[in-house]
Image (cartoon, rainbow, N blue to C red):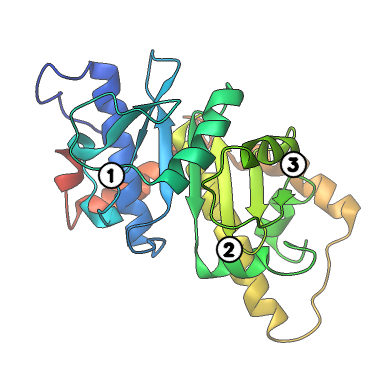
Amino acid sequence: MATQLKPNSRYSEAEWEARQQLAACYRVFDMLGWSEMIYNHITVKCPDEENAFLINPFGLHFSEVKASNLVKIDIDGNKLDDNPYPVNLAGFVQHAVFHRNLPDAHCIMHTHTTAGMAVSALEGGLQPINFYACNFAGQIAYHDFEGVTVRSEEGERLIEHLGDKRVMLLKNHGILVMGRTLPEAFIKHWSLQRACEIQLATLSMGQPVHVPQEVVDVHQRDLSKVSIPGGPGKADFDAMVRLVDRTDRSWRE
């Protein structure tokens, strides 16, 4: 993803690059129809700062997020810059617990897409009945709905239920994915969203065909053979950013 030089000395080159990548991701999510009014969140850890991360300003639509208006907060929710926008408590509580406890959770994405919420509310959750669902078979954690996520004590259960997985369906709530990089988290979210969309379409028609476990195992084993250089999701994410740039490049500011 091409970026521009930092606009002033407030940011390091590394932080500005992270800000631009995250701002671009918000615009990509909006382009793909994953916005939810002014709610939901994508966060990334600040480079070279162990206990700081970037989050969207509460009150702005995903289409309004820019590199410069992202809010920088510490792991306890304190703002670390002079950004005038507040931070949504529900976003901070959920994301902070993972950033605090999981060193590999560089980027965390949470959405309320129609398909994601619908499958999360279905007994049995995601089923191995399509190509993308087979990517995730045996790799999804589930967490029971406890209401809006504003109580820090729920974090203990979120961590416990996540275990060693990095994809979770929050029951009756939506999608939660995390990655070692933003593009890796993006391709997880995109694939899980597609799996949920296709499951909704399939179940509306009748009894689905379940893929046998032995075929799922082969599918997951061979997925790496169709990857391209650059790391998981990089080429996919860059392609989406190019599409965003055709209509609006203001995320770079």
Q: Residues within 10 Å of mark 1 (few under 14, many from 20)?
A: many
Residue at mark 3 to residue at mark 2: CA–CA distance: 18 Å
Which residue is pictured at 15% across the width and 19% down the height?
A: 10
Find residue 219 and report its horizontal and vertical position in percent: 76, 48
> Which amino acid lies under the numbered mark 3 shown in the image of this protein?
His
* Label 2 crowd bin: few (<14), some (14–19), many (20+), radius 10 Å: many
The N terminus - image quarter: top left
Q: Residues within 10 Å of mark 3 (few under 14, many from 20)?
A: some
Q: Is residue 210 above or below residue 186?
A: below
Secondary-structure class at tag 2: helix
5 and 19: which one is in front? 19
Residue type for callout 1:
Pro
Residue that badge 2 annotates: 116
Q: Earlier in the sequence, mark 2 or mark 1?
A: 1
Viewed as shown, does residue 24 lie left or right of 82? Answer: right
Select label 2 or label 1 by which is in front: 1
Q: Nearer the viewer, mark 3 or mark 2?
A: 3
Q: Indicate the position of residue 117 as horizontal and vertical percent values.
A: 58, 65
Q: Residue at x 16, y 47 (%)?
A: 249
The one of 59 and 250 positioned closer to us in this rendering: 59
Mark 3, residue position:
161
User: Quick check: 151 left or right of 57?
Assistant: right
Q: Which residue is mark 1?
A: 57
Residue 21 at what x, y percent from top left?
32, 35
Q: In this view of the protein, which residue sits in the foreground, 15 or 241?
A: 15
Q: How many marks?
A: 3
Q: Inspect this view and state whether residue 236 appears.
A: no
Name the residue rendered at 56%, 38% in the picture. Answer: 178
For the residue labelled by badge 3, is the local secondary structure a helix, a strand or a loop?
helix
| Above or below 149: residue 166 | above
